[in-house]
Image (spheres, helix red, strand yellow):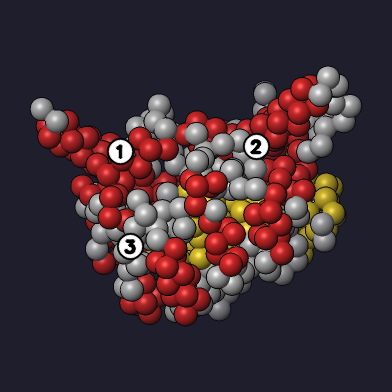
């Protein structure tokens, strides 16, 4: 069998290696799905495809650890919604009307949108499991896109009242069938996780049973926590700790209103945290917990959450997370009558969250998150010569504060080029957008007719 070889020539490699930032002009050789060599002036042979990266930053693919991908066709629907309006609008009104085809289209569109923005891996927190066909459609959408993903098998989107308000319904046991039928290897690009409600949305005994089921399935388990008033009301982390349920297989999204004691418990048990700053600021979840997580040395990462309310790229989330935490620290010092003399969070902290931090959050740090020999070739090239990003003084700042999805020249996942020269390789993107537009319009028109 022939070996596929790709040489990325002339770029500035930007990646963490052994917790140290590496920034240097280095060539990268990819063979099949993995990085086989990194160095200066690597030799080009006739059997190689050459990608010229002069003037570009070669970065690990960005990693989004919390996104509800099925909602991708409803951009702007939640732009003025609070959390409660979102729950009632998306999960109460729209989700029950989604067909398997609607879910497939949304997941394919959302995954391609992520790839276009340099996101090579995402956690799809899929609470639209209305039937087996809905689950199959969501999985197929991810797989057809070529992205690397964890498919978080969630609850049905048939009744927000039954499933998300102190619910007494345990997680669907069909998760066993889904895993057996579709997820037989951890070496595939799309693998499985469990997306449960947790103690802020379901009864504590239900949460316990859901966690135990996830562990029986040997899956990572993700849940929302610390969302606005729900955090202090339910004291979820402390209750889970009291039941002896906290562990490194648990991922929590948000964490805005958790206490310092909660963060100590998360750190002590090796839990991870996914921060989605834009949506948190909008929907009343509280101030982003970026600084608290970093101070407690918790594995933390970033997510878009819902494109119904914000853009689908991580560049916006990186910038928002950084400046929101700086605002928090500046305000504390200002209220004490002083001026902050040195910023306590840096662009490197945030770049780490979007790359190796995301990989650690998903338990994939042995495969992705850094550019190193032997790791999967999940690589993006950012055109740093463009107006608005050039000239480059600080490549990390270029990634965190200046870059946009339009600056993404090349995206590679497991050695497969999915975007090149700024153009997506998926050939029917325009047709897909039109299909998604029709899908969303039909559902919204149906909802409008019901209110008249």
N-term-proximal mark, 1 vs 3 = 1
214 to the left or right of 175: right
Residue drawn at (74%, 48%) of the image: 294
N-term-proximal mark, 2 vs 3 = 3
On screen, 100 above or below 87?
Answer: below
Question: How far across and down, in percent of the image, does residue 155 sit?
Answer: 34, 60
Q: Residues within 10 Å of mark 1 (few under 14, many from 20)?
A: some
Residue drawn at (26%, 67%) of the image: 132
On screen, 384 above or below 416?
Answer: above
On screen, 134 above or below 403?
Answer: below
Q: Is residue 412 visible?
A: no
Q: Which residue is mark 1?
A: 89
What is the spatial separation of the Cα atoms under label 1 and label 2, in whole angstroms?
A: 26 Å
Q: Nearer the viewer, mark 2 or mark 3?
A: 3
What is the spatial separation of the Cα atoms under label 2 and label 3, in whole angstroms?
A: 35 Å
**Helix, strand or loop at disc 3?**
loop
Dots 2 and 3: beta carbons under 8 Å? Answer: no
Residue 168: mark in rendering: 3
């Amino acid at each position: 069998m022939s070996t596929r070889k790709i040489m990325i020539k002339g770029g500035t490699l930007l990646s963490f290696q052994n917790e140290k930032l590496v920034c240097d002009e280095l060539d990268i050789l990819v063979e099949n799905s993995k990085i086989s060599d990194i160095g200066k002036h690597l030799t080009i042979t006739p059997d190689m495809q050459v990608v010229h990266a002069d003037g570009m930053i070669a970065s690990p693919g960005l990693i989004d650890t919390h996104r509800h991908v099925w909602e991708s066709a409803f951009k702007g629907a939640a732009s003025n919604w609070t959390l409660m309006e979102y729950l009632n609008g998306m999960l109460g009104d729209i989700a029950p009307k989604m067909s398997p085809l609607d879910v497939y289209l949304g997941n394919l569109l959302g995954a391609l949108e992520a790839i276009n923005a340099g996101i090579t891996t995402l956690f799809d927190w899929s609470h639209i499991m209305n039937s087996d066909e809905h689950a199959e459609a969501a999985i197929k959408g991810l797989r057809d896109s070529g992205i690397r993903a964890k498919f978080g098998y969630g609850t049905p989107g048939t009744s927000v009242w039954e499933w998300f308000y102190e619910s007494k319904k345990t997680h669907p046991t069909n998760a066993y069938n889904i895993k057996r039928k579709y997820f037989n290897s951890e070496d595939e690009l799309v693998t499985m996780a469990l997306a449960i409600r947790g103690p802020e949305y379901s009864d504590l005994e239900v949460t316990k049973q859901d966690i135990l089921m996830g562990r029986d399935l040997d899956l990572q388990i993700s849940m929302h926590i610390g969302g606005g008033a729900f955090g202090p009301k339910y004291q979820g982390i402390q209750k889970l700790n009291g039941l002896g349920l906290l562990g490194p297989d648990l991922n929590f999204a948000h964490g805005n209103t958790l206490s310092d004691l909660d963060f100590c418990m998360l750190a002590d048990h090796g839990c991870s945290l996914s921060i989605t700053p834009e949506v948190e600021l909008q929907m009343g979840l509280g101030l982003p917990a970026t600084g608290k997580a970093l101070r407690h040395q918790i594995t933390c990462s970033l997510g878009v959450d819902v494109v119904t309310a914000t853009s689908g790229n991580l560049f916006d989330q990186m910038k928002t997370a950084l400046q929101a935490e700086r605002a928090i620290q500046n305000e504390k010092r200002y209220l004490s009558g002083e001026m902050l003399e040195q910023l306590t969070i840096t662009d490197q902290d945030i770049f780490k969250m979007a790359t190796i931090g995301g990989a650690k959050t998903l338990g994939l740090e042995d495969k992705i998150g850094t550019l190193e020999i032997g790791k999967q070739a999940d690589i993006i090239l950012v055109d740093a010569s463009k107006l608005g990003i050039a000239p480059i003084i600080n490549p990390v700042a270029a990634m965190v504060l200046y870059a946009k999805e339009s600056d993404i020249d090349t995206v590679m996942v497991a050695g497969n080029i999915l975007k090149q020269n700024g153009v997506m390789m998926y050939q029917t993107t325009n047709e897909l957008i039109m299909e998604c537009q029709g899908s969303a319009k039909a559902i919204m028109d149906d909802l409008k007719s019901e209110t008249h």
